[in-house]
Amino acid sequence: MGSRVPENGPSRIAQRIAKLKASRSRRRNQLLDDSSDDEAYDMVTAACIVRSFFPEKRSHGGSVPGHAMIFRDREGGHRRMYQDYLAPNPTYGHDLFRRRFRMSKTLFRRIMDAVEAHDNYFVQKRDACGVLGLSCFQKVTAALRMLTYGVSADSTDEYIRIGESTALESLRKFVATIVEIFEAEYLRHPTEADVARLLAVNEKRGFPGMLGSIDCMHWEWKNCPMQSQGQYKGHANRPTIILEAVASHDLWCWHAFYGMPGSHNDINVLHRSPLFDNLTEGKAPEVNYTINGHEYKMGYFLADGIYPHWATLVKTISNPMGNKAKYFARAQEAVRKDVERFFGVFQSRFAIIAHPGRIWDRETLALIVRACVIMHNMIVEDERVLDPDERFPDAPNDNVQPSHGTPTRTLAEFIEASKKIRDKPTHFQLKEDLIEHLWNRHPDLYPMEPAS
């Protein structure tokens, strides 16, 4: 008796076979997916490793991982600062304002308004959440505190309510804006009117034809990169950058050349300086004067002993012999102190120059120096007491006649002008004439010390 197969048997067998095939297909697909995931993971890992060797600079703004949000009450800080200094009845008067900002309130407002109008960075704005940002007063004050007191950026936070990174950014923006706005006016070459005034004042001091005093100072660079320290180390055995300056009797700085490494001396700096560019190109006002019967057509600067024997430089006598030479040496060294006085006042007014520079890049250091020189000249102009005897709308006297120079147009004329500037016989002749001029015309202007 044979066994009987159910009627639905073939269909059930077919269903079971289909299920086995589907299960096998799912397992195969899963294995394939796992292998593709491993390949993708390996590719992402390799891409991250490659990217780590080429880091991209993060754009300004946005969330910073691990950044702690500090509520500084910036609006309250601005109100307190305004009441302290700028209100109609401020907490601290004009004397304390002048002491802490190194300038008068009128000049400070002029600078602050010009900076705000020139650079949109200093305009107070609201962020995406509607929160009011730092005011122009806060940013400018933070920059000035770092310049005048030489303090770190973080130390300005407690009073001004500004973060360290924002304070540094404000400093860089501020000095760059000062240079862009005021350099053409307050770090200019002497005009014809300036030359006439300088010549007339120095004629009374016994030095007709003198335009100022020249010297160099070193600013230590604390954060000089290690690979550059050998280039910037000089006699002080620490990295420095040199500032060459020319100053007049009222401490106005007429020339500021900054950026030469500290391994150079004053002669090397002079050879690379643009001090005499206008004179060699024929753009500077000509100076015609007569001393002891000899005519001269170029102004000169007083310098110390290291400078070369050029017709535009008058040096002292290191070992003077005789009363005339001793009197000239005393007078030259006394008048040459104008530039030394400038360096002293400059470092006292802007303490960041007196302290080692903590900025990492030379470009910002150069902007800081130029901005400080510009603001120094602005302060000198703002506080200058004008003597009616020092106003010379016309030619100062018969011996000194400034006039416009003729721009040099040929290479031969340029070379000839350079030779005249470096003419050694003219240097010694000018010195001899000044010795006689001081002894005969101004014998009591610089009292001699009694002989021991």
Image (spheres, rainbow, N blue to C red):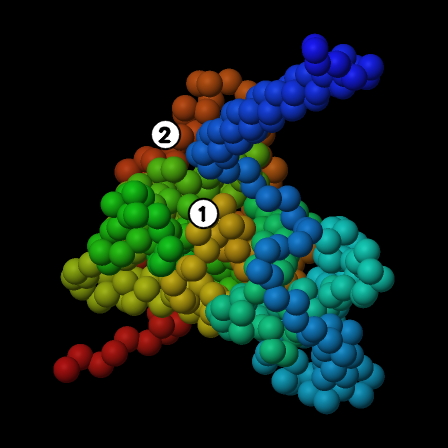
Residue 77 x, y percent position in the rendering: 72, 77
Q: How many C-alpha atoms fall within 10 Å of the one at disc 1: few (<14), some, or many (≥20)?
A: some
Query: Which type of secondary structure does the marked residue at label 1 adopt?
Result: helix
Amino acid type shown at disc 2: Lys
Any mark on residue 419, and which? 2
Work out whether mark 2 precedes mark 1 in sequence or the reverse, and give the earlier one: 1
Query: Which type of secondary structure does the marked residue at label 2 adopt?
Result: helix
**Cα–Cα gap, marks 2 and 1:** 33 Å
Q: Quadrant of the C terminus?
A: bottom left
Residue 144 x, y percent position in the rendering: 60, 67
Residue located at (49% from left, 60% from top):
248
Q: Is residue 213 above or below residue 413?
A: below
Q: Quadrant of residue 385?
A: bottom right
The reply to whether residue 140 is in sight is yes
Q: How many C-alpha atoms fall within 10 Å of the one at disc 2: few (<14), some, or many (≥20)?
A: some
Amino acid type shown at disc 1: Arg
311 to the left or right of 47: left
233 or 10: nearer the viewer: 10
The reply to whether residue 186 is in sight is no
Any mark on residue 362, and which? 1
Total numbered circles: 2
Q: Nearer the viewer, mark 2 or mark 1?
A: 1
